[in-house]
Amino acid sequence: MTSSGRISQSAFDGSRLRVILLLDLYDGAQQKFLDAYELMCNQVASVPGHISDQLCQSIENPSQWLITSEWESAPPFLAWVNSEEHVETVKPMHSCVKDTRSMRYSILRETHRNQQQAAPKAAAKGATGAHQVQARVGDGVARHALTFTVKPGSESKVAEILAGYEAPQAQVDDVTRLRRTSLFMHGNRVVRAVEVEGDLPAALRHVARQPEVRAVEEAINPYLEQERDLRDEGSARVFFTRAALPAVHHVVADRPEPANLRRHALYYPAKHGQGMELARLLARQDESAAADPKSAVHASTVFQRDDIVVRLIDITGELDADPAASLGIGGAGKAAELERLLDGPAIGVEGSLETERNANRLLSHADMMPVTDRTSARS
């Protein structure tokens, strides 16, 4: 974060990460939960980037538990928590837990009773994570996305269903409200991005309970490639866990918001195992664009899970007016970097991205089809 005051939220600042998971257990599920936790501990202990974890039980309400873990930085944690291995590892916990809430914090400062005392566990595991350099400036908005695929041939029907639903009530409670929902498709892949003021989990639960949203979700069930049963809590939880597409970087330029902003979503399938590096490249590029007063990119959010990378940008003018800026490959060597990380054949683009023809071709193929983009008015 620079001293300019621009908004910048990122998983790529290199600082150590503290993850907090609050859980409320069902009566009688304590031993099953403890067994599941031991299994998870054994799995996560060997994950690169993991430093330590703790299991705590409330002294006031024995059904309430807290799991905390520390990581060298956010990327290894995100890679683990969004992996299929993690999904399978935590399945035994689902039948034990009534409610959960996960929070992730970068470590800004810490103190020890003896300032010369090192963190023994971190040192033992060779932790390299640093403290966050300075407090970031946000805008009070949490961002998240979901992605899933539908059966080939059903794309137009699914788009029709998703475009036709009635928007849920924006105000969730005194402090939480839905601000914006943007939905795009790329072939048979659906991406729904949400912006929430206040408590993101509360907003997501609120949306899931709305009759108009439940009706739409039920209507698209027959067309999904991955089956789900929303009436079954376990099935729904696994589906939405696999569909999670976290925001790993967000930046807004420190200049007045133009009146003619347009929102686009660009899809970047990465080569196997390169999704995080591709997202990191786009994040660096968008930080540079935010500092350039001539850049058409005013705001950007990068979402990433495994080898799926989606970049949501708010720009002035036409998308193809400056293909390099729109794609996030402005500057010497950046097109070659993206070419190294991108699965070009998967998106129908092969050859050097340093040629104008291929850059324009990639822009055309990466640009996702807008389905809905709804901003909630304040009441």
Image (cartoon, grey):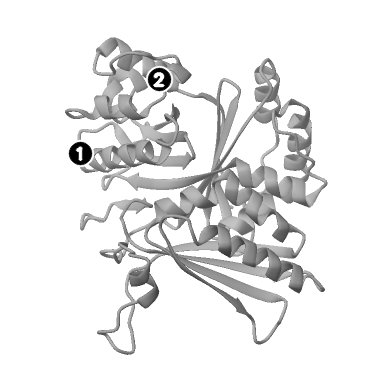
The location of residue 83, given as percent across then percent down, is 55, 46
Of residues 219 and 120, the one nearer the viewer is 120
Dot 1 or dot 2: first in sequence order is 1
Name the image quarter holding residue 220. top right
Type of the residue with mark 1: Asp
Compared to residue 291, the image places residue 52 above or below, namely: below
The location of residue 152, given as percent across then percent down, is 66, 18
Dot 2 corresponds to which residue?
344
Type of the residue with mark 2: Gly
Between disc 1 and disc 2, the foreground one is 2
> Which residue is painted at 27% across and 37% down in the image?
285
Question: In the rendered image, is residue 374 in sight?
Answer: no
The location of residue 148, given as percent across then percent down, is 62, 33
Of residues 328 and 124, the one nearer the viewer is 124
Of residues 200 and 331, the one nearer the viewer is 331
> Which residue is painted at 30% across and 21% down in the image?
323
Question: In the rendered image, is residue 17 in sight?
Answer: yes
The location of residue 164, given as percent across then percent down, is 69, 29
> In the image as oriented, which residue stretches furthest toward the left?
332
Q: For the residue carrying disc 2, how many other residues have a C-alpha within 10 Å: few (<14), some (14-19), or many (20+)?
A: many
> Which residue is painted at 56% across and 58% down in the image?
43
Dot 1 corresponds to which residue?
292
